[in-house]
Image (spheres, rainbow, N blue to C red):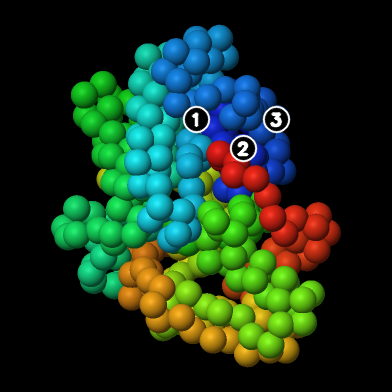
Amino acid sequence: MQKQAKVYVAGHTGMIGSAITRRLREQGFNNLVLRTHRELDLCSQTGTETFFATENPEYVILAAGVVGGIRANSEAPVDYFINNMSIANNVMTAAHRHGVKKLLYLGSACMYPKNCQQPMTEDMLLTGTLEFTNEGYALAKICGSRLCGYFNRQYGTDFISVIPSNAYGVNDCVDPNRSHVIPALFLKFYQAKQAGQKYVKLWGTGKALREFIYADDMADACIFLLQNYSGSEPINIGTGNEITIMELTREIKKIVGFEGDILCDPSKPDGMERRIVDIKKISELGWKANIPLEAGLQRVYDWLLKVGKWQEENPRE
């Protein structure tokens, strides 16, 4: 991929998309094509087709999507399924029609079965039942990943898909109704500290194990794979490290400086008991994550304090 190549980053205002955009610019890629959701609705087939016909990007990084945590996914499965399916269908079809050299599609670790053997290898997709709380989103992401392979098989395209572990970082969604676990916990502890509360309630038992990757590491991996990987099989991106939700909660409590207690609410869902991706394939290609969880969490909190972004509207990445 040449430095002067025309690269379209779909979803550049979102957490992963903005990290990818920053990394591309830092590496000398300045011919970037960027559109906000207001400027281009990727759920519109006509609008997406017109955009590709006009801009003719050489490379596409498909980081756009409708995302959210357990609560949001549980309450609006139709929205998460239809919108994410539409985005994948429209972008890939237009990319093929207009001769895009290479496309990278971002999937999600929730694509793996609920009771999947851990760590999860790429060949475990579609081998079992999905976690019900985010099934709509997961199905849409599975279809998008498979669609990459179908285009490659039928039309000889170079579309690749990646499956990241739980990503976090600056520009994450801090809406209490849609946040993933890390920004949701920062919001809870910050507000509790400001209000002088004696405790914070944690959804679930806190026993679930999760792997987290900082957005900038995720961006590095995506750019690395664009330059070093081709194939119809998806490839995992992760750190190889995991932590319980309770341990994560205590770390965030310490960073915020909240002195009260943590109370678990076992009536709320934990999601999958354990979720960590196998990173053998990407490690053998020569890539590894560099930002420890503690350092990444501190960066997120510093960003939140700087921008005062403790609640936001419902954006679409």
Direction from residue 14 to residue 77 in the image, left or right: left
Amino acid type, mark 2: His
Q: Secondary structure at mark 3?
A: loop
Residue marked by disc 2: 12
**Image vertical order of residue 187 relative to residue 198, above or below:** above
Residue 83 coordinates in the image, percent (x, y):
41, 35
Tag on residue 44?
Answer: none
Q: Nearer the viewer, residue 92 or 289?
A: 92
Residue 316 coordinates in the image, percent (x, y):
56, 39
Q: Secondary structure at mark 2?
A: loop
Q: Secondary structure at mark 1?
A: strand
Direction from residue 238 to residue 169 in the image, left or right: right
Inter-mark Cα distance, 1 to 3: 14 Å
Direction from residue 171 to residue 164 in the image, left or right: left
Mark earlier in primary sequence (2, 1): 2
Amino acid type, mark 3: Asn
- Quadrant where the C terminus sits is top right
* Residue at 63 percent of width and 22 percent of height: 39
Eye-nearest disc, 2 or 3: 2
**Image vertical order of residue 101 relative to residue 211, above or below:** above
Inter-mark Cα distance, 2 to 1: 11 Å
Q: Nearer the viewer, residue 188 or 108?
A: 188
Residue 157 coordinates in the image, percent (x, y):
33, 26
Direction from residue 298 to residue 176 in the image, left or right: left
Residue marked by disc 3: 30
Amino acid type, mark 1: Val
Mark earlier in primary sequence (2, 3): 2
